[in-house]
Amino acid sequence: MLLHIPLLETHGHLSPHHRDRFNFWASLAVHTHLLCIFLLVFAIALTPIGRWWTWAIYGIATLPILYWSKVDLRILIKRMAIEFAFISVILVGTLFRGGGQILWQWRWLQITTNGLTVLGSVGIKAFLSLLLLNILTLSTSVPLLLQALVTLKMPPLLISILASMYRYIGVLTNEFKAMHRAATARNFAPQNLYNYQRGDRAWQRQVLGNMLGVLFIRTYDRGDRIYQAMLARGYQGIPVVTESTSGGWRDRLAIGCIIIVILSGQVFIH
């Protein structure tokens, strides 16, 4: 998720219907969103291999959340594609697990029925978990998520680390963009590093190395200044909670429904 921090600030572009009073999901408190999503993700991840109908139940439960969240499907699909490209390396490794009937073999490499079952199970787990987490981050801003963690009594040090990561990744990104624009104006381009016809490849590499070194020094100094400014403004180690919603009957009903869905998948569906 940290790879897409700039895209997280999309809550202001949600459809006007997102605040529709008939939208059950939007009427819930943010910490209820967080709790429901985490409960479903943990249930999906802890489901044993080969429980296809259980994951089907959880997938059906995800559909109304996706509909009510009113997220932009193009951004959601783009994120899912990028994240699946990273985890596909792990998924491919599960395909060649031994055990069961051998379906294909070339020397020591073989595909078995057990390997296909593991690949399908891990793939479904990863898909549903990423889908739920992306829905949460696309429909909720990072400050609201941090406030929800405070409401759920998460350790203050953990919340402080997450808030600092979010703040400093933004600083790092802005500094890199400014340096990249300055280097581009001086005839630097990353694709020139792979052009063997150019005679200034050594200079291009030197520019890239200088950028990375200066980037580290600048972000370190600016991060220290930001931290000192935060202390001067009364920062005490945890994010300031501007509003706190205790939750009503809708929140309790939503959590109860999620628990029923989870128990139905784990106990009654085999």
Image (cartoon, rainbow, N blue to C red):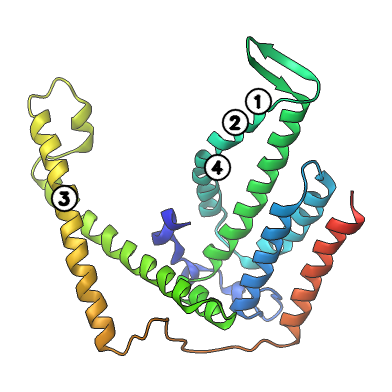
Badge 4 amino acid: Phe
Note whether residue 53 is visible. yes
Q: Position of residue 62 (x, y in %)?
A: 72, 59
Question: Residue flagged by tag 3: what amino acid is it?
Answer: Gly
Query: In front of the other: label 2 or label 4?
Result: 2
Secondary structure under badge 4? helix
- Percent position (x, y) of residue 121? 72, 41
Specify which label sits upstream in the sequence, 2 or 4. 4
Which label lies toward us, 4 or 3?
Answer: 3
Kindly report the distance in space between the C-alpha atoms of the residues bearing marks 1 and 2.
6 Å
Q: Does the CB distance between marks 1 and 2 fall below 8 Å?
A: yes
Instruction: Classify mark 1: helix, strand or loop.
Output: loop
Is residue 211 shown above or below 100? below
Mark 4 / mark 1, whichever is N-terminal: 4
Which residue position holds label 4?
A: 84
Q: Relative to residue 223, is residue 169 drawn left or right?
A: right
Residue at 68% x, 81% y: name it. Answer: 21
Q: Which residue is mark 3?
A: 213
Location of residue 263 in the rendering, given as x and y in whole percent from the top left corner:
84, 63
Q: Determine which residue is flagged by label 2.
A: 93
- The number of discs equals 4
- The CA distance from mark 1 to mark 3 is 42 Å
Give the residue pinned by disc 1. Answer: 96
| In contact (CB < 8 Å): disc 2 and disc 4 | no
Alpha-carbon span between mark 2 and mark 4: 14 Å
Looking at the image, the residue that sits furthest to the top is: 107
Residue at (18%, 31%) from the top-left corner?
192
Sequence-first disc among 4 and 3? 4
**Amino acid type at mark 1:** Phe
| Mark 4 and mark 3: Cα distance apart in space | 31 Å
Left or right placement of residue 238 versus residue 104 in this view = left
